[in-house]
Image: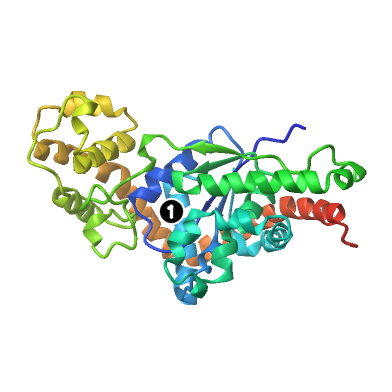
């Protein structure tokens, strides 16, 4: 069966969006809107799998929405909304709780990492999170999902759930005139080499909002002076930049900064090394400061302007949720019929 091509993208509103989020996700979302129909979702129901302060959560939902808009996502051409405004996410997640198997969830490595040693104290939501993620995607029968390496396993689970639903309810799907399969098996849109941005203080660790040092990351709300200062203070090594990519092996900080320059400038790493190879880090860092400030400065300024107008952001989310609900309700009406609910 042919499914209409559709991209679903989600970002958690858990505060402090940084350069890694921008290069690994948001920048790609902006590019995807030129070639695909897209739904951009602030996944606030996922955020509460660990406790959130309600006032902070509201602020962070608006901040992620502001980042989408400031980065160039067009909420009139595509759908920008927050998950909790569309009840179909929770309803379909329950159906999928009854389709997915415990053994599948027990294999999810992210739960083990996030729950830590005391798994008995983790919320049921954190454990069942992947079923909700599957519901997010399949509620719109999305065919493609941009994912980082850490989400590939969840997308595989989404495909397994879709396949099992299609198999378990095959006769009912056909009897309701819905063809051979109701849900597509979504394909990943894997990011390029820039999808993994490392800490500015330790090239072996991913850039993270939870790092105690603010110098380890460039926040999307940082102004030009702060961006420049953090790049100048970024950890490097005493050797000059190599002219070939092989020369970056064993030099994680150098590799990270070259990767950031390449991603922000939309050029290949080899081009960066051809231009700056053999030169001192100070020269390269000065060029990286100029590029980062030019690219990120306007985004931070626009984010701050938007966040100061919460009514405007809320209106965008309301409009997006109303449009998403139309698609979601069409799916759920069919799911209720397929499963055998009386309506």
Where is the C terminus found, in terms of image quarters?
bottom right
The one of 303 and 262 positioned closer to us in this rendering? 262
Question: Residue 171 placed where, x, y %?
Answer: 88, 44
| In the depicted structure, whether residue 222 falls above or below residue 248 | below
The one of 114 and 211 positioned closer to us in this rendering? 114
The answer to whether residue 140 is seen in the rendering is no
Q: How are the colours assigned in the image? A: rainbow
Question: Residue 28 placed where, x, y %?
Answer: 46, 40
Residue receiving disc 1:
67
Secondary structure of the residue carrying numbered label 1: helix
Q: How many marks?
A: 1
- Residue 172 lies left or right of residue 60; in this view the side is right
Sort mark 1 into few (<14), some (14-19) or many (20+) by Cα contacts within 10 Å: many
Question: Residue 272 placed where, x, y %?
Answer: 23, 29
The answer to whether residue 243 is seen in the rendering is yes
Residue depicted at x 23% and y 62%: 213
- Residue situated furthest front in the rendering: 103
- Residue 293 lies left or right of residue 4; in this view the side is left
- Residue 24 lies left or right of residue 280; in this view the side is right
Where is the N terminus found, in terms of image quarters?
top right
Residue depicted at x 52% and y 66%: 311
Residue depicted at x 80% and y 48%: 168
Question: Residue 247 placed where, x, y %?
Answer: 18, 29
The one of 150 and 35 positioned closer to us in this rendering? 150
| In the depicted structure, whether residue 198 falls above or below residue 114 | above
Residue depicted at x 68% and y 49%: 161
């Amino acid at each position: 069966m042919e499914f209409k091509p559709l991209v679903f993208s989600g970002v958690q509103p858990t505060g402090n969006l940084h350069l890694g989020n921008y290069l690994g996700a948001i920048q790609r979302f902006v590019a995807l809107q030129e070639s695909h129909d897209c739904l951009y979702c602030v996944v606030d129901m996922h955020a509460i799998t660990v406790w959130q302060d309600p006032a902070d959560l509201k602020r962070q939902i608006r901040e992620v929405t502001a980042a989408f808009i400031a980065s160039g996502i067009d909420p009139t051409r595509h759908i920008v909304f927050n998950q909790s405004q569309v009840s179909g996410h929770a309803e379909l997640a329950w159906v999928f709780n009854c389709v997915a198997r415990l053994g599948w969830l027990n294999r999810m490595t992210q739960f083990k990492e996030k729950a830590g040693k005391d798994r008995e104290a983790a919320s049921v939501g954190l454990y069942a999170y992947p079923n909700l993620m599957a519901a997010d995607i399949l509620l719109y029968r999305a065919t493609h999902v941009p994912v980082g390496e850490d989400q590939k396993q969840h997308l595989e689970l989404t495909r397994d759930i879709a396949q099992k639903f299609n198999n378990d309810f095959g006769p009912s799907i056909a009897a309701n005139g819905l063809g051979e399969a109701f849900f597509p098996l979504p394909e990943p849109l894997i990011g390029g080499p820039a999808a993994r941005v490392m800490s500015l203080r330790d090239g072996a660790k991913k850039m993270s909002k939870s790092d105690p040092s603010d110098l380890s990351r460039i926040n999307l709300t940082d102004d030009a002076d702060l961006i420049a200062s953090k790049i100048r203070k970024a950890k490097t090594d005493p050797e000059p930049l190599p002219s070939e990519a092989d020369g970056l092996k064993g030099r994680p900080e150098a590799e990270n900064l070259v990767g950031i320059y390449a991603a922000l400038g939309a050029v290949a790493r080899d081009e960066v090394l051809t231009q700056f190879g053999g030169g001192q880090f100070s020269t390269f860092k000065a060029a990286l400061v100029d590029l980062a400030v030019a690219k990120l400065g306007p985004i931070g300024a626009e984010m701050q302007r938007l966040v100061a107008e919460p009514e405007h952001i809320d209106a965008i989310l309301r409009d997006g949720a109303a449009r998403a609900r139309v698609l979601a309700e069409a799916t759920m009406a069919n799911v209720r019929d397929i499963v055998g609910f009386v309506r």
